[in-house]
Amino acid sequence: MSQAIAEYQLFEAKQQQYNANPELMIARDWSAALTAFMNKDFVSTIMLPTGVSAEMLINNDPEIQKEMERLAKQRLSQESYETRMEQFERDLRSSRRGIEDPEQ
């Protein structure tokens, strides 16, 4: 409950800031978000001299790609296993009915 109240109070404060000066509020929030992102361990920065342009061609990380493929195969294997078990249980129920009630 107290977290919801705190979130509401934060929203109210941000709404008042926005109403007073939308450009400043957006610039401040954008700056805070960018700073938080740039402080992450996985972020690298490259400083270029003023007036120099650069083009970066970035390919997929092979380790991430392998992990995604592994997870996809694992999911497919699990789905296949579940399908086989459902079929096995249907077959088992069907064969039990024939044994328990031979007239069916």
Image: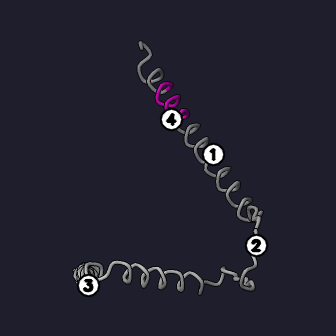
Q: Which residue is mark 3?
A: 13
Disc 1 and disc 3: Cα gap in Å? 48 Å
Residue at numbered disc 4:
89
Query: Which amino acid is tagged 3?
Result: Ala
Count residues near mark 4 (Cα–Cα under 10 Å), then give few for <14, some for 14-19, many for 20+: few
CA gap between label 2 and label 4 equals 61 Å
Gap in angstroms between the C-alphas marked 4 and 3: 59 Å
Question: Which of 36 and 3 lies nearest the eye of the viewer?
Answer: 36
Q: What is the C-alpha distance between the residues marked 3 and 2?
A: 40 Å
Q: Secondary structure at mark 3?
A: helix
Q: Position of residue 33 (x, y in %)?
A: 49, 81
Q: Secondary structure at mark 4?
A: helix
For label 1, the SS is: helix
80 or 20: which is nearer to us? 20
Mark before the other along the chain sequence, 4 or 3 = 3
Q: What is the quadrant of the C terminus in the image? A: top left
The stretch in magenta equals 87-95
Q: Earlier in the sequence, mark 2 or mark 1?
A: 2
SS at badge 2: loop
Q: Main secondary structure of the magenta part?
A: helix
What kind of residue is marked 4? Glu
